[in-house]
Image: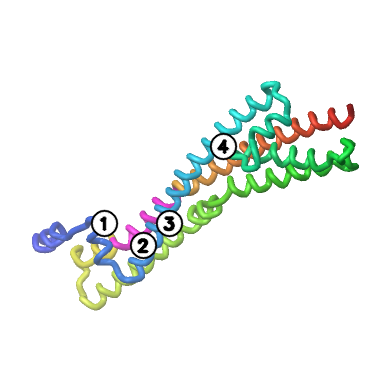
Amino acid sequence: MDQQTLAMAQEMDFSLLALFLRASLTVKLVMIVLTFASFWSWSIIIRKYISFRAARLEADAFDRAFWSGEPLDELFDQIGPAPDGASQRIFAAGMLEWRRSHRHDGELIAGAQARIERSMDVAIAKEGEGLNAGLSFLATVGSTAPFIGLFGTVWGIKVAFEEIAISQNTSLAVVAPGISEALVATAIGLIAAIPAVVAYNKLSSDADKITSGYEAFADEFSTILSRQLDA
């Protein structure tokens, strides 16, 4: 490598901003899409971490209140018509159906147990949908971002070869910028994909555990009501 070529290579700006500005329009679009996907993924990750933590704390607090020995009717009246947490909403769904299943003379309408269980199942399903909302985006980013980045890299290399053919110059000063711009697209794709995949697996597992807790509570609550029905 001659001194002139080396000097030209050293003078090139290889910062991310410079590489982005020099990239072709297609590669720029790839970088923008991947950067947006990365930021949106992190916003979902942060929001889910906060909401899952709040859901666990709420479930623990309500579990203590539920097993405190307070009559269920009084606990239901305290919660009111607009429950704050998921456990409260599941409990309220069961209690509301329990009260609806009583006739004016105090006798239970046939099939009350099945209706109460279905009401709580519907409430659990709604809570599960809320827990899993947004996770599909993380899965999509995790599976597609590397390939989108690879597309940007292939396109960038194609453009670099075209520039080499036009200039008839294969020196490092001509080749390096185009190759660097192309490789940045793959790097951004991996930066977007890796956290998304890790977070998706972790959050999906957490969502399943929280939902299982709701189902366990519903089973316990249903057992308590079943004893009262059989009494």
Residue nearest the viewer, comparing 107 with 126: 107
SS label for mark 4: helix
Q: Earlier in the sequence, mark 3 or mark 2?
A: 2
- Dot 1, how many residues are within 10 Å of its Cα: few (below 14), some (14-19), or many (20+)? few
* C-alpha gap between disc 3 and disc 1: 18 Å
Quarter where residue 170 is shown:
bottom left
Structure colour scheme: rainbow
Q: What stretch is highlighted in magenta?
A: 181-194
Residue marked by disc 1 = 16
Give the amino acid at mark 1: Leu
Q: Point out the residue furthest to the front here.
A: 104
The disc label shown at residue 55, or none: 4
Q: Earlier in the sequence, mark 4 or mark 2?
A: 2
Q: Is residue 168 magenta?
A: no
> Where residue 67 sits: x, y (%)?
68, 24
Disc 3/disc 2 C-alpha distance (Å): 9 Å
* N-term mark: 3 or 1: 1
Q: In the rendering, at what x and y percent does residue 160 appear?
A: 29, 69
User: Is the stretch drawn in magenta largely helix, strand or loop?
Assistant: helix
Q: How far apart are marks 4 and 2 (CA)?
A: 34 Å
Above/below status of 196 relative to 7: above
Estimate the spatial distance between the alpha carbons at disc 1 and disc 4, rounded to whole Å: 40 Å
Question: In the visual, does 215 lie left or right of 175?
Answer: right
Residue 182 counted in the magenta span: yes
Describe the element under mark 3 as helix, strand or loop. Answer: helix
The residue pinned by badge 3 equals 37
Q: What residue type is labelled 2?
A: Ile
